[in-house]
Amino acid sequence: MRRRIEDNESPDRWVVSYADFITLLFALFTTLYAISVVDTQKLGKFVNSLNSALGTEISEQGSAVIPELVKPSRISKRIESELRGVVGSFSRDLNVRRDERGVIVSLGEGSLFASGSVEIKESSLKVLAELSLILKGIPNKVLIEGHTDNLPVRSSRYNSNWEISTLRAVSVLRLFIEKFGLPPERFIVAGYGEYKPLRENTTHEGRAKNRRVDIVILTDREAKML
C-alpha cells in the first residue's frame, strides 16, 4: 500500500512550490518599490521644517548649506583697513586685536562717552556706523562688553561701576540695532565693571585704557560656549 501511494505522486509537484516562491518574490519587490517612491510634497514639507528648526538651508537631495563664519584673521585685517580712513580723533582710543575668542574692537571711553555718562557722543557715530557696515557683512555673533577703571562712582545717577559698564554696552547695542538695523539675535551684552582691566589701575594712563567698550566678533566655537 505504501509503495502504491508513492507511485501515484505526480512528478510535477515541485511546480506548485516554485509558483508559490515566485509569487512571494513578486510581493516582496512590489512592496520595496512602493517604499522607494518618494512623496515630493511630503519631502518638501519635511525639508522646510528642518530648515526652520536648524537655521540651515537643506536641499531635497539632503545636502546642508551652512553659512561659513569669517575667520578672525580676515576680520581683523578688514576692520583695520576700513576704519583707518574714518577714525580721526578716535585714533588713540581705538584698538583692534585678536585672542582665543575672536576679533576685539576696543573703543576707549574718551571718544565714546563723557565722563560718568552712558550716552554715546555724536562725534563717535561715524566710526560706529562704519563698524556696523562691517558687522552686516559677516555672520558671526557679537559680544559687547562694558569696562571701567576701579575708581568709585561719583555720579548720583548710578550706583556702581557694574551699572555704568553694563549701560554703556547696552547703549552701543541699541545704536547698532535701532539706528543701523543690525539683527538683535546676533548680540550678547555684558558689563564687567573694573574686573577685567587691560592695564594696572595705579596710573592715570592705565585707568584710561581700562575705561572702554569691547566689541568682540566671536568665533563659532566661542559663540556656542556662551
Image: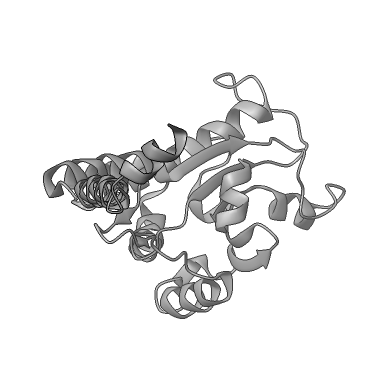
Front position in the image: 161 or 6:
6
Front position in the image: 175 or 76:
76
Residue 190, x across and y down, in percent? 59, 36
The quadrant where residue 67 appears? bottom left
- Which residue appears at 49% of the width and 50% of the height? 142
Residue 100, x across and y down, in percent? 70, 61
For the N terminus, the image quarter is: top left
For the C terminus, the image quarter is: top right
- Which residue appears at 25% of the width and 41% of the height? 46
Q: Is residue 15 above or below residue 151?
A: below
Front position in the image: 37 or 180:
37
Residue 175, x across and y down, in percent? 35, 44
Please indicate whether residue 118 sits to the left or right of residue 201 in the image.
left
Please indicate whether residue 98 sits to the left or right of residue 70 in the image.
right
Residue 62, x across and y down, in percent? 33, 58
Please indicate whether residue 194 sits to the left or right of residue 84 in the image.
right
Q: Is residue 82 above or below residue 29?
A: below
- Which residue appears at 22% of the width and 52% of the height? 33
- Which residue appears at 57% of the width and 41% of the height? 115
Q: Is residue 106 above or below residue 54?
A: below
Front position in the image: 23 or 44:
23
Q: Is residue 65 visible?
A: yes
Q: How many marks?
A: 0
Q: Is residue 118 visible?
A: no
